[in-house]
Image (cartoon, rainbow, N blue to C red):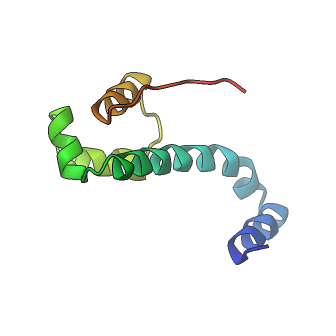
Amino acid sequence: MSNLKEYVADRKKTDKAFADGFEEGYERFKIGVVLRQARESAGLTQEELAARLKTQKTAISRIENHAADIKLSTLDRVARALGKRLEVKIA
């Protein structure tokens, strides 16, 4: 097990607030990572994606690093700007 996984497992055992909020926070983090990876695989910089979306680089950075409460319409616009389509799945 990696050091990070060990840290998270130990912290969940000893810190109820951390454990309660971990999964939700992790899901938000994953959204930003997926968006960054999609942008990079499309060969775009944050500035280039921002230009396609008629916004600023800081907005792209905020989406990739703090994807909390991001609207589905925003995710769809980003996906389309990357030449992708958005799929939503409830599991």
Relative vertical location of residue 15 with respect to residue 27 in this rendering, above or below: below
Query: The C terminus is located in which quarter?
Result: top right
**Is 61 left, or right, of 70 in this rendering?**
left
**Is 45 left, or right, of 86 in this rendering?**
left
Q: Nearer the viewer, residue 84 or 15?
A: 84
x, y percent for residue 24:
64, 43
* Number of marks drawn: 0
Q: What residue do we see at 46% from left, 26% from top? A: 86
Q: Nearer the viewer, residue 48 or 22?
A: 48
Q: What residue do we see at 52% from left, 24% from top? A: 87
x, y percent for residue 76:
38, 25
Q: Quadrant of residue 79?
A: top left
x, y percent for residue 10:
81, 70
x, y percent for residue 68:
47, 41
Relative vertical location of residue 72 with respect to residue 25 in this rendering, above or below: above
Q: What residue do we see at 20% from left, 42% from top? A: 50
Q: Quadrant of residue 54?
A: top left
Relative vertical location of residue 76 with respect to residue 47 in this rendering, above or below: above
Furthest toward the right, the residue is 13
Query: The N terminus is located in which quarter?
Result: bottom right
Q: What residue do we see at 55% from left, 48% from top? A: 30
Relative vertical location of residue 87 with respect to residue 67 in this rendering, above or below: above
